[in-house]
Every structure is written in C-alpha cells, then in structure tokens.
Image (cartoon, helix red, strand yellow):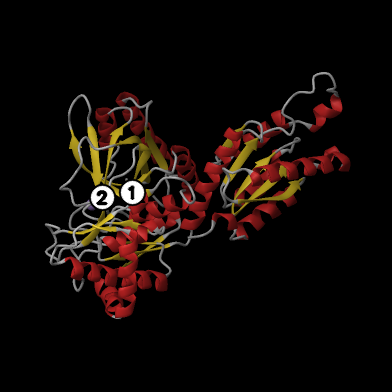
C-alpha cells in the first residue's frame, strides 16, 4: 500500500498585487512557517508542500492545472492571509479536480492590543479575506472542507489530518482495479449495483474473472512455497484444532489458495477482490484464511460478489494506515435482544480481518455448513472493546449512498467457545432500536466496513470528496429527523440530476 509520506498536499496562499512586494514577502514567509508547522504535526500523515502565493487569475489557473497533473498531489489547502479577489480564482477552481481544504486561520493568534496599527490590520486580513474566498466556492457549489482556528492548535491539525487521510483514500481509488471472481451471489440485491456508474463517480473499475482463471494460477504454486507459508502461519497464530483429521490438508489447501490469489492480484495490479461461495469450481475450499490475511495487508475484500464493500474496505485501509485499531469486512450476523442490553454480533462465514483481533488469532478448521466444499481454514478471535464505525455503501439507482453507524464494541457476556469464526460484539448509538430502524429505513446493507481506526470525520470528508450522500447514525439521531433527511435527500439528489449515479 502507498506510503502516506509520499503523498503531497499543496499549501497555497491567496493574495493580490495591491499589497506591494514587501507585504507579499511577509505573506510568503508566514505561509512557509505555517506549512512547516503542519508538516511537523503528528496527526498529519502526508507531506505538506508550500507552493505559492497566488496573486493573479493566471497564477490561480496554473497552480490548479499543475495540481491536476501531479500524481503525488492528493489535494490543496488554501488560505487568504490578505484579501484575494475571488473573480481571479474562478477559472482555476473550475478545472480543479483535486480535493480542497479551506484553512481559515490567521498568522497571529492574538490581537496585539497595545501595538496594533493600520499596517498590522492590512496584513492580517484572513477574517475578511477568507470570507471572499469562501463565497466563490459556495457560489460555484464546490465541495470542500472548511477548517477554522489557529494553525498551531491541535484540534485544527487533527481536522487537517483527517481530511488528508480521506484525500489519500480518494486518490488511491482513482484508477484502482478490483478483481471479482464469479458474479453476484444468486438473487441478492444490495451487493449488486451499477459498476459503470461507480466507475464514473468513484474512479475505480471492477473487473470480472472466471474462477477457473484463478485455479490455473493456484495450480502452478510450488510445494516449497507452501511449506514456507505454513511455517509462518505456525509462528503467527496459535493452532486451534490440530487434532482434526482434516487440519493438515485444509491448512495446506488454504496456503496454496493464498499463494495463488496473491500472485493473481499482484499480476493484475488489483487493490482488492471478491469471492462467492456459490462459484468455487476447482477450489478445494472457500478462501477464508487467505481473504483474512490479504485484508490485513490492506487489500479490499467483499464476500458474495460484494464489490462495493470491497472497494470501500480498501479506501478505509488507506485512511487507517498507521493508526491504532483495525479495519475489516463485516456483517451484522445475529442479535442479543435483551431489552435492557441489546447488542449485535458481527461476524462472517470466515472472512474477518485479523487487524481487529484482540489476542493472537487461533488457526482452526471447521465445516462450513453451506457451499458443499471441504472444511475451510480460518482465523478465530474476539475484537477488543472500544469505539468503532460501521459503514455501508449502497446503490440507490440515481445515486450511491453511504450509511454510517457509530458503535461501541463490548466484550461478549460469556466466552463464545463453540463459535468457529472471528467476531465483534457491539452496542449501537444512539440506541439499538433507533440505530437499526434508521439503518433499515436508509437501505443500509448487511455487509459493512467496520473500523476502530477510521473516524466519522474522515468518512464525512471522504463522502464530500466523492460527492456522495452520507447518512450518519450517532448519538444525535432521532428516527423522525432521520426520515425527514431521507425525504429531503430524495429531492436534493433528484434536482441534482447526476449523470453518473
Ligand atoms: Mn455475507
């Protein structure tokens, strides 16, 4: 996965010639100082590059052209230390294809009460300069993030950090390829959708392959590679069911599938893949352990042909890079409906990412019960208590919609001794009934991306970059307001008349 340090956010300061050279030199020096401070901020994982003090329409246009053409540039931060008349920004902003963050800050934190004079006033004009800058972006209906406050303030830097993580994920999606083995599982609706619309809106493509193409690569895997991989399994995981007669063969088959998958994905330059347990012809077992291990390395994954969740998981993996807490494919599986303490048990048949494991995962072999294949190998573990988000991406026909629920992971009431899959137990915000009813009114899927690293703020920034609807279910949600938001959004997105869904 791309090193976030290699990605650049360009810092651009708006001004004009009116101020004269001396003032402009000061503006540039101050801008460089702010850029360096942001570069040094722990919460900002990307490279900050001061680019220019923009003083004319030509310069604004040039810098936006340059940003569009620079693969390492994932977004722009703009700020108007002094006043920058916004008509000169129109042509540049019109062609800009990179995300934008408008930093509404000021070089000085405090008003110098006893020494302030008109020279100081004329240099430190962000309070009105940034209003002009904001107007033109609102007038042009441009999506952007506005961050307000002193540039050394931790909260301000955290907001910029969240946005730059979202911008990294957005950049990662552009031109990304996801590999889909087989098609959708039978008649499931929510995992399907318009892949052409997705490519137009999100920038990634979904490429279908017959499972036989993968089997061919798996058959070429060498025995010595398998031996090496099994050794690394043994050092990474505890062996949960070594007494089973099928254990050795099953783990061996899983290792063979992992090596084949790895090589297939690498050759095709894929950033994620989907499988379906209905289409496994030529595979000994459903790829459980291989999917779990590839997810933990940053690959997107979706079960049952779910290419939308696969792509979303990849984006979350990029946003989460280097942060504490894991990120996984997830499914709302079953409920604990005690009215005093309702909870959700999230899991999947096999494919949950070990990045969310509380302890060393246990490598186990058990029958699957469906699919009619041999017993697959999988990692079994619990998830550590703490805050998390569940996010779903669905196709509403005239648009895509993201739905996010903030949840709190809790320990199971009792050890789940007989459950042979990885799992997480959580409580929904604001409460179980409101959350699941809102989720169902919103059409949220049973499949989600679950993350203990990605914040709601990052997802909001990401949705804004994608210009996609986002419904948030959190402490403040009431069903009445939520349903009203659903109705209002129908009108808004209907009027917007997107060509690409
Ligand atoms: Mn599923």
Secondary structure state at the residue bearing disc 2: loop
Question: What x and y, as percent, mark residue 335?
Answer: 19, 37
Considering depth in this image, is 392 or 264 the residue closer to the camera? Answer: 264
Pick whichever of labels 1 and 2 is earlier in the sequence: 1
Residue 186 screen position, x and y as percent:
18, 58
Question: Which numbered dot is residue 422?
Answer: 2
Q: Along the horizontal axis of the image, is 230 left or right of 318?
A: left
Label 1 packing within 10 angstroms: few (<14), some (14-19), many (20+): many
Question: Which quadrant of the structure image shows residue 24?
Answer: top right
**Residue 386 appears left or right of 212:** right
Residue at (23% x, 71% y) in the render: 253
Q: Is residue 25 left or right of residue 471?
A: right
Residue 223 placed where, x, y %? Answer: 29, 79
Task: Tell me, yes or no, whether the two marked residues, 1 and 2, touch with CB atoms within 8 Å.
Answer: yes
Residue holding disc 1: 357
Is 222 rendered above or below residue 312? below
> Can I make out residue 44 in this image?
yes
Would the CB of label 2 be found within 8 Å of ligand 1? no
Residue 155 occupies which quadrant of the picture? top right
Q: Position of residue 237 (x, y in %)?
A: 31, 58
Classify residue 294 by image quadrant: bottom left
Residue closer to the observer: 93 or 408: 408
Q: CA distance from mark 1 to mark 2?
A: 8 Å
Front in this rendered view, residue 71 or 299: 299
Write the residue at 34% across / 34% down: 408
Which residue is found at the position 15% from the left and 48% from the top? 418
Which residue lies at the image location 25% right of the left edge and 60% below the top edge?
A: 288
């Amino acid at each position: 996965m791309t090193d976030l340090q290699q990605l650049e956010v360009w810092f651009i300061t708006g001004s004009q010639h009116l101020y004269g050279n001396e003032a402009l030199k000061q503006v540039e020096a101050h801008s460089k100082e702010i850029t360096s401070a942001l570069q040094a901020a722990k919460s900002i994982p990307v490279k900050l590059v001061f680019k220019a003090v923009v003083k004319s329409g030509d310069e604004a246009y040039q810098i936006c052209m340059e940003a569009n053409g620079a693969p390492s540039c994932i977004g722009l931060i703009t700020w108007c230390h002094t006043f920058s008349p916004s008509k000169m920004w129109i042509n540049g902003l019109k062609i800009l294809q990179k995300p934008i963050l408008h930093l509404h800050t000021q070089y000085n934190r405090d008003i110098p009460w006893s020494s302030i004079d008109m020279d100081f006033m004329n240099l430190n004009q962000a309070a009105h300069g940034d209003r002009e800058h904001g107007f033109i972006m609102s007038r042009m209906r441009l999506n952007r993030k506005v961050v307000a406050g002193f540039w050394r303030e931790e909260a301000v830097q955290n907001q910029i950090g969240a946005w730059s993580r979202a911008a990294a994920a957005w950049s990662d999606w552009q031109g990304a390829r996801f590999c889909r083995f087989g098609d959708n599982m039978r008649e499931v609706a929510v995992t399907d959708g318009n892949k052409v619309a997705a490519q137009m809106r999100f920038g990634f493509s979904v490429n279908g392959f017959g499972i036989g193409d993968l089997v061919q690569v798996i058959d070429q895997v060498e025995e010595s590679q398998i031996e090496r991989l099994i050794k690394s399994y043994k050092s990474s995981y505890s062996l949960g069911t070594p007494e089973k007669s099928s254990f050795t063969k099953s783990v061996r088959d899983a290792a063979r599938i992992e090596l084949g998958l790895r090589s297939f994905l690498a050759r095709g330059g894929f950033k994620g893949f989907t499988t379906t347990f209905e289409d496994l012809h030529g595979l000994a077992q459903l790829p459980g352990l291989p999917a779990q291990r590839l997810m933990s390395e940053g690959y997107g994954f979706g079960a049952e042909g779910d290419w939308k969740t696969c792509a979303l998981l990849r984006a979350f993996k990029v946003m989460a890079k280097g942060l504490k807490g894991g990120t996984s494919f997830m499914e709302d599986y079953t409920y604990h409906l005690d009215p005093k303490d309702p909870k959700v048990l999230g899991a999947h048949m096999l494919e949950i990412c070990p990045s969310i494991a509380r302890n060393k995962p246990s490598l186990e072999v058990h029958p699957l019960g469906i699919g009619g294949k041999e017993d697959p190998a999988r990692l079994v573990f619990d998830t550590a208590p703490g805050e998390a988000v569940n996010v779903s991406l669905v196709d509403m026909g005239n648009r895509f919609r993201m739905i996010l629920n903030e949840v709190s992971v809790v320990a199971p009431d009792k050890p789940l001794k007989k459950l042979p899959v990885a799992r997480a137990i959580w409580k929904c915000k604001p409460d179980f009934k409101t959350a699941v009813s809102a989720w169902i009114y919103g059409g949220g899927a049973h499949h989600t991306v679950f993350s203990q690293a990605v914040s709601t703020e990052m997802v909001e920034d990401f949705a804004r970059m994608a210009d996609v609807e986002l419904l948030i279910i959190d402490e403040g949600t009431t069903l009445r307001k939520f349903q009203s938001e659903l109705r209002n959004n129908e009108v808004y997105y209907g009027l917007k008349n997107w060509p690409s869904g």
